[in-house]
Each structure stands twice: as C-alpha cells, then as structure tokens.
Image (tube, coloured by chain):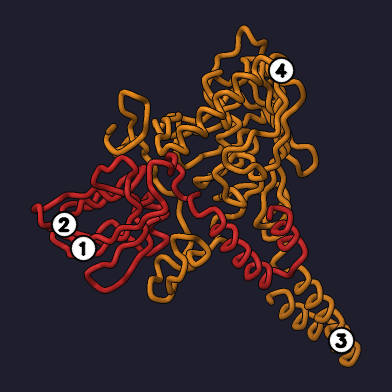
Chain colours: A red, B orange
Amino acid sequence: MNDICRDVYLRAPRRSVRRAAGVAMVLVMLSIAAVAEAHHSYAMFDRSKTITLDGTVKEFQWTNPHAWIEVVVESSDGPKQYSIEGNNPRVLSRAGWTFNTLKPGDKVTIVMNPLHDGALGGSMVSAKLPDGRTLTGR
Amino acid sequence: MIARTSTNDNARVRLPNGRTALLGAAAIYLLLAVANSSHAGTTHRGARDISGMWEGFPLSLVFDATVKPGDPQKVVLQPEYDRSYKASLASKSQSEAAGKPAADDLTLCMPVGMPAAMSALFPMEIVATDKVVYMIPEGVDPLRRIYLDGRSIPALDSLNPTFEGLSIGRWEGNTLVVDTAGVKTRTKTEGVPHSDAMRINERIRLLDDDTLEDVITITDPIVFKAPWVITKLYKDYNTITTADTPAGKGIDPGKYPNHGEAELEPSEFVCNENNRNLPGADGIVGFEGK
C-alpha cells in the first residue's frame, strides 16, 4: 500500500492526486481502523461485540488523551453508569464533535465495544445526539 | 496571472511596431501560460521548506508501516538481545490475545523517544530555521531540536541521555541529514532494545509539496547485528480532509464547515490531563486501573 500510494502521489496531476490520495487514504484507514486508538492497546475491548446504550449524559469530558462520556442507563436493576471512551478531541473534531457537543441531561444513544473485563464501559463506536446527528466516536 | 497582464501591457507600450509587439506578447503569454500550467501544484514549497504539519503515511500503529502489528521488526539483533526481544514479543502477543494488554510508555503518557518519536501517528509540526529545525510532536514526546550550527556529537561519556537524544543536522543538497545519539536506554521503539551507543542517521527530504520522507538508519554496535533501516513517509496534514479519516467518514463538510476543508491547526495534547487508562497493580490496562 505504501508504494502504491507513493506512486499515485508522484505521478498524477494535483487534482486527481488529491482524489486518488483520498481514496487511497480511506482504504488505508479502513484497513487499519484501530489506528486512531493510539494511546493504548485496543485489546481491552471486545471488538466482536457492539452494545447499544440509550441513556442520559452525566458528564462530557473533552480531554486528552481521550474524551469520555459518562452516561446513565436505566435498567431493571436500577440506573447504571457507563464510562464511554472516545478518541482524542483532535480526532473527534474532524468528525464534527466540539467541546460542547454534549451537556449533562442530554439523551444519547451510544454504540460501543464493551470492555473485556465486564466493567461498565467501552470504546465508543458512534453516538446519536439529541439533534439527530450520529457522529463517529473514534 | 499578474505576470501575464503586465507582460502584455509592457509589450504594447514599449515596442514601436504594433504587429510585432502583439505577436511577441502572444508568444510570451503562451510561454508563461504553459510554464504556469506545468508548474501549478508541484512546487509551492521551497525544496528545503519542510516546515508545516505532518502526519505519518500510511497512518500505522507500527513505527515501520511495512510491519504488521505483532510481527517482529525487520531488525537483526545479537543473539542474547534477540532472545529477550522475541520473548517480550511473545508475552505481549499472549496478553493482547487474552484481552489483558500491559501498559507501555505511551499508555503511561511517557515519551516514546527517538526514533519512535518520528512516527507522527499524532501529527507533528516542523519549524525549520537556518540554525535549528524544531520538531514538535503532538502527543507524548517533547520538542525535538536538530542543531544546524556545525557542532559535533560529544564523546559518549559526556553525552547526557535524553528521550530524544542530541541531534545534529546539515543540508546535503535538499536533503537534511541528521545524526542523533544519547537516547535513553529505557526507550524501546516497538519493543526493540538498544544500548547507549545507539546512533540514528536520518535523511529527510521533500518528495513533493505534500510528502516528506525520512530514511532512518539505526545502528547499535552492542545490540544490533546490522543497521536497522526504516523509511517513513509523511503527508501534509492539511491535504488529508475530514472525509478521508475514519472519524470523518461520511460526514458532509458543507454541514460542518469548521470541520470540513478548513485548515487544521495544531492541537494541544496534554496526555496526563485525564489519563483514565492507568494500569492496575497487575500492570494490565483497563479503565481507572481496574
């Protein structure tokens, strides 16, 4: 992939370079989707499972090395608080997130890969916001 | 465009023969137009202007993008170091497969050091001056300075070990050649050990306006059997648009104008602001050390 992309960049005119590079970049990115989770190993999450949570935002932490959403989900056992890890603010910004995208009390639907150890939390795949937008979480 | 207009105007004014003047102007116009079109988009930068925001390309979790995660690096180590390296690789692979990853320096928000600091997995800003080239990685590593003032690397016993080492550079044509020594032995690029005698040679050059290359040759007379060579490529961070990233996949730049085609600024990244991935007593990474 390395050599292919390099050739594309070197040989093609600029406009098509960008287009071709964009396509190449998407392919590269998709092939290494976990790359964005760079600060730590992704092995703590069970990527074969996705869990969807409908809950209420308790806290939105727009911080490094990761942004976090603390979300409370009602269940038959009573309310449960989940810690949802997103990517870092820079990466999330590129997906449309801002520091004030969420506030306490917001209703959200979050899709996550859960922790292997069974703790209430996981890695955010996406979040559906109160305004109807669905943004990628990593 | 400015050149074309002024050339035409000047030709009409200064030449006495109107027809000759028009033909001359047309010829110059054509020459400039051809030159302009072939020139467009190829050299906005000076050949040594490596300043800017760069991101590793292809973006890879592994420093050498040609190595798959978990595979051994393309380095030949002396037998005793090879044994310990392979053992640590196997142990890491085992803990990852069990869903119990061990903490590394990056997870602890510690610098990864040279040469891993050149990964630009998080973008890296370069500010090139005549005397010093500053490399400012977003993420965990501190500012790296490459001195171009002609100094030399001192003897090992007077070289203060640091994460980034001491880097001395010089221009050879349009290639910035950098030698680095004095890297702390606690740093292990992709788990590969090194001694305090490790030396790093880099040949950094622009391949085109948007692409920077760093050919990194690492030698270590104690730990390595042969030089370890890695070629890194970087892309201008602003040529990678939001829609090209996994995070931005599918979003409409028009709907989010500040996060579409807008110029991207360097980010502040204070890793210890809220590191909730600290390892527990067993060294395993989870949430809040659990």
Query: Label 1 is found on which chain of the structure?
Result: A
Q: In the rendered structure, which amino acid carries the disc numbered 3? A: Ala
Q: Quadrant of the N terminus of chain B?
A: bottom right
Q: In the rendered structure, which amino acid carries the disc numbered 1? A: Asp
Q: Are marks 1 and 2 in contact (CB under 8 Å)?
A: yes
Mark 4 lies on a secondary structure that is loop
- Depth check, front residue: B239 or B128: B239
Q: Residue furthest left?
A: A78
Q: In the rendered structure, which amino acid carries the disc numbered 2? A: Val
Evaluate whether residue A113 shows in this view.
yes
The spot of residue B84 in percent (x, y) is 59, 19
Say which residue label 2 marks: A73
Local crowd size for mark 2, using a 10 Å CA cut-off: few (<14), some (14–19), many (≥20)? some
Mark 2 lies on a secondary structure that is strand
| Residue at (69, 41) in percent of width and height | B214
Q: CA distance from mark 1 to mark 3?
A: 76 Å
Query: Label 4 is found on which chain of the structure?
Result: B
Q: CA distance from mark 4 to mark 1?
A: 55 Å
Q: CA distance from mark 3 to mark 4?
A: 75 Å
Left/right placement of residue B40 relative to residue B278 reads: right
Q: Are marks 1 and 3 in contact (CB under 8 Å)?
A: no
Q: Residue furthest top?
A: B157
| Residue at (87, 82) in percent of width and height | B27
The spot of residue B60 in percent (x, y) is 57, 47
